[in-house]
Image: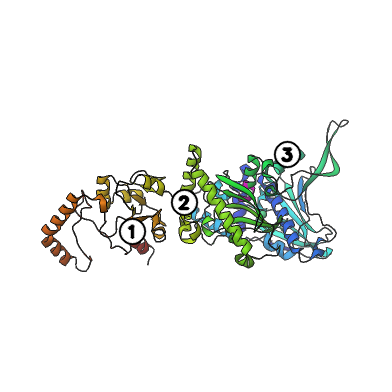
Amino acid sequence: MSKHTHAFQAEVKQILHLVTHSLYSNKEIFLRELISNASDACDKLRFEALDDAALYEDQPNLEVRVFFDAEAKTLTIRDNGIGMSADEAASHLGTIAKSGTREFMAKLKDDEKAGEQKKDANLIGQFGVGFYSGFIVADRITVETRRAGWPHDKGVRWSSEGTGEFEIEDIQRANRGTDVILHLRDEEAEEFLKTWKLKSIISKYSDHISLPILMNKEEWDADKQQQVTKDEWETVNKAAALWARAKSDITDAEYQAFYQQISYDTEPPLAYTHNRVEGRSEYTQLLYVPAKAPFDLWNRDKRGGVKLYVKRVFIMDDAEALMPVYLRFVKGVIDSADLPLNVSRELLQESRDVKAIREGSTKRVLGMLEALADSESAEDKAKYQRFWNEFGAVLKEGIGEDFQNRERLAKLYRFASTHADEGVSFADYVSRMKEGQEVIYVITGDSLAAAKASPQLEIFKKKGIEVLLLIDRVDEWMLSHLYEFEGKSLQSVAKGAVDLGKLQDEEEKKQAEVAAEAFKPTLDKLKAALKDRAKDVRVTTRLVDSPACVVVDEGDMSGHLARMLKQAGQ
Ligand code: ADP
Ligand code: MG
């Protein structure tokens, strides 16, 4: 029997420090984290046991038990899930392997460099704080575990005070699975070692864990005049997967609680949709649109936020094949009745059932957004604008990715224009088009102020013609995929000789011709002087106050795009 001391990976020390200090005001979440790990461990066992039923040993019922010893001041979270080998305990409880957590740490370091000391609670909420959150309330954690299917003498005890190091030793352990034993500090023992308190935290955060969470029964003892703990166990959570229950039985508060449980978002979602789909492919979907963008929204490699279940058995987190990349902000659960339980990420990419699920889910999400955008209620409209401010730029990626839904997507897009600083849809624009106007005029720019100040807008302002101001970085890219809306083409006012078509009266056309003739000598001189720098110099009627402006040829890169590429070093 050997006992070894190991040092935590440097990042773990940082996480420990951060978690214990910044989350102290919200310390009860430790229980949610540890129960969620226990539940994950049971999911993993169920999954591995598909190939090897012997892993169940003599305990086929997966469950989590929560119990305490008020005298010893210990609280134990026990599961009969997959358990850990000594190597797994050392690596899973001593290092940080998850890419999300690494990114998170990197972001925090950036903030620190930038002198921002505020450890944004929201940011912390966006990643699971995990096992180490136990140290918010405990000054020592002991983990006793044995991996399913391994001999009883291959048990492991992991123990740490959550400072620099942890110890690992071999133990005998008959029970498969893991006990996480928290040695609570006095103050926390006082607060948490009460059955009613623990029950209320469990129902707040862990009601929808699909396993039973058991606690000892308590009874009023008339002689002693107090509650006494009995040897019997009772289930204290609902233990039914929320999405599998009938819609009519689920309250809004339950939907919200479930969202917080899967997303770690501190804010309620903007909208959600819950459906059972039958037909060619059978599945249940419960999908949420968050109110706030996560810090890593721009990482297109980041997997999506949708968990895949097959007939209530958890298969994988972040199943990116279930949602198009441009909807990577959607969170939720999809439970399929058709997929095989041993489906892999690779198989998912090719499966026709998955394709049907992805198409169906995309339509649902777009429908949810349309319901907000087109709603009569001012509250919904405001919600949609909020959504747009957070996620609009990502939704614009869809125009090049999702040919099937491009019309629906274009209708959901919102812009600034010379008419309003935000919230202008193509439909709004079209409804305000002037008599005789055939195209949708747009201009791109780095900022609202820059776009508004563009001299190329002068003639449009003078004539009261609206121009869309496209100021997102993705807009140039979007324009290369979106040429028209309901038959009206999009035309950049910064390109070519803007053809005002029927909007220009005869008088103006004549003036332009006369001016071109009169200024020919001047133009020739300018052309000669700018020989290597300008393709052409011509007289224009598009300016009202400015003497001159630079435009690019139809089909050439716009000045804005050229500047962006130059900035990016291309
Ligand atoms: P996460 O759950 O997001 O992976 P945690 O910090 O909560 O991160 O847990 C780290 C890892 O420790 C888990 O991924 C798992 O491998 C292991 N682990 C934690 N608790 C248990 C448990 N009760 N049973 C088995 N493994 C566990
Ligand atoms: Mg966890």
Horizontal relation, residue 494 to residue 514: left or right: right
Amino acid type indicated by mark 1: His
Question: Which corner quadrant of the figure contains ligand 2?
Answer: bottom right
Q: Indicate the amino acid at tag 2.
A: Gly
Asked if one can make out residue 83 in the rendered structure from this viewpoint, the answer is: no
> Which SS class for mark 2?
helix
222 with respect to 332 (left or right): right
On the question of residue 169 being in view, the answer is yes
Q: Earlier in the sequence, mark 2 or mark 3?
A: 3
Q: Earlier in the sequence, mark 2 or mark 1?
A: 2
- Is residue 148 found left or right of 357 in the rendered image? right
According to the picture, the residue beneath numbered tag 1 turns out to be: 560
Q: Which residue is mark 3?
A: 197
Question: In what element is the residue under mark 3?
Answer: helix
Residue 273 lies, with reference to residue 93, above or below; the image says above
Label 1 sits on a secondary structure element that is helix
Q: x and y percent of residue 107 in the render?
A: 52, 55
- Residue 475 image point, x, y percent: 40, 56
Report the disc number at residue 392: 2
Furthest-right residue in view? 223
Dot 2: within a 10 Å radius of its alpha carbon, few (fewer than 14), some, or many (20 or more) residues? some
Highlighted range, magenta: 259-264
Please name the residue shown 74% across and 63% down the image: 48
Q: Dots 3 and 1: beta carbons under 8 Å?
A: no
Badge 3: residue crowd in 10 Å (few <14, some 14–19, many ≥20):
few
Q: Nearer the viewer, mark 2 or mark 1?
A: 2
Q: Main secondary structure of the magenta part?
A: helix
Q: How many marks?
A: 3
Amino acid marked by disc 3: Lys
Q: Is ligand 1 within 8 Å of the beta carbon of the residue shown at mark 3?
A: no
* CB contact under 8 Å: marks 2 and 1: no
Disc 1 residue crowd, few under 14, some 14–19, many 20+, Cα 10 Å: some
